[in-house]
Image: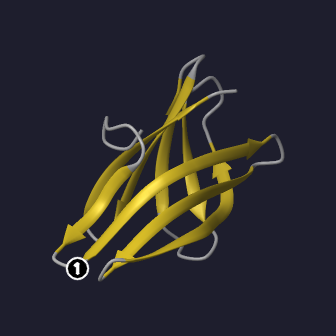
Amino acid sequence: MIDTKALPYSMFADTGYALDVMSGSLSITPDRKWVSRMTTRETVAGNVSTYSDSAFGTWSTVQGSTSASLLNAETNVISTATWTISDITVTDVTNGVTRRILYRRN
């Protein structure tokens, strides 16, 4: 889910153009690394293309806390992740836009 809306999520839509998030995953490993993968669908003047993108980096947390900082290795942007027994929520701020991305645990 992105901003409490189920996927596919309309990231942007305008006349002749749309960008939708179709799926995503987040993997966090004990060696303090993370990888997120996202599949998007872009529609330009009726022509549809599908893309797979990924981001990766390192994470840190305070012992006993239920939140972590995710540092993107490519952009140096830090996102905040909080978790419960069933899900992880990442708060991402990109270009001044804040989105909350909810990942369900497997």
Front-most of residues 24 and 33: 24
27 on left or right of 39? right
Amino acid type, mark 1: Gly
Horizontal and vertical percent for residue 93? 35, 59
* 66 over 5 or under it: above or below: above
- Quadrant (top left, top right, bottom left, bottom right) of the N terminus: top left
Q: Which residue is mark 1?
A: 16
Above or below for 83 versus 30 = above
Q: At 22% across and 67% down in the image, what residue appears?
A: 13
Q: For the C terminus, give its image quadrant.
A: top right
Total label count? 1
Image location of residue 38, percent across then percent down: 57, 58
Q: Nearer the viewer, residue 14 or 32?
A: 14
Would residue 88 be found to the left or right of residue 9 on screen? right
Q: Residue furthest left?
A: 15
Query: Going by the image, does 87 lie left or right of 90?
Result: right
Q: Is residue 82 left or right of residue 92?
A: right
Residue placed farthest to the right in the image?
Answer: 31
Task: Give the answer, above or below, for where 100 lies relative to 53.
Answer: above
Q: Can you name the residue that lies furthest to the top here?
A: 85
Q: Residue at x 31, y 60 (%)?
A: 11
Provide residue 77's location: percent of width, then percent of height. Answer: 48, 67
Taking depth in this image into account, of 77 and 105 the one nearest to the observer is 105
Graded by Cα atoms within 10 Å as few (under 14), some (14 to 19) or many (20 or more), the crowding at tag 1 reads few
Residue at the far front in the pictured view: 46
Q: How is the image coloured?
A: secondary structure
Q: Element type at marker 1?
A: loop
Residue drawn at x 83%, y 47% is 31
Q: Between residue 5 and residue 57, name the one nearer to us.
A: 5
Residue located 67% across and 62% down the image: 57
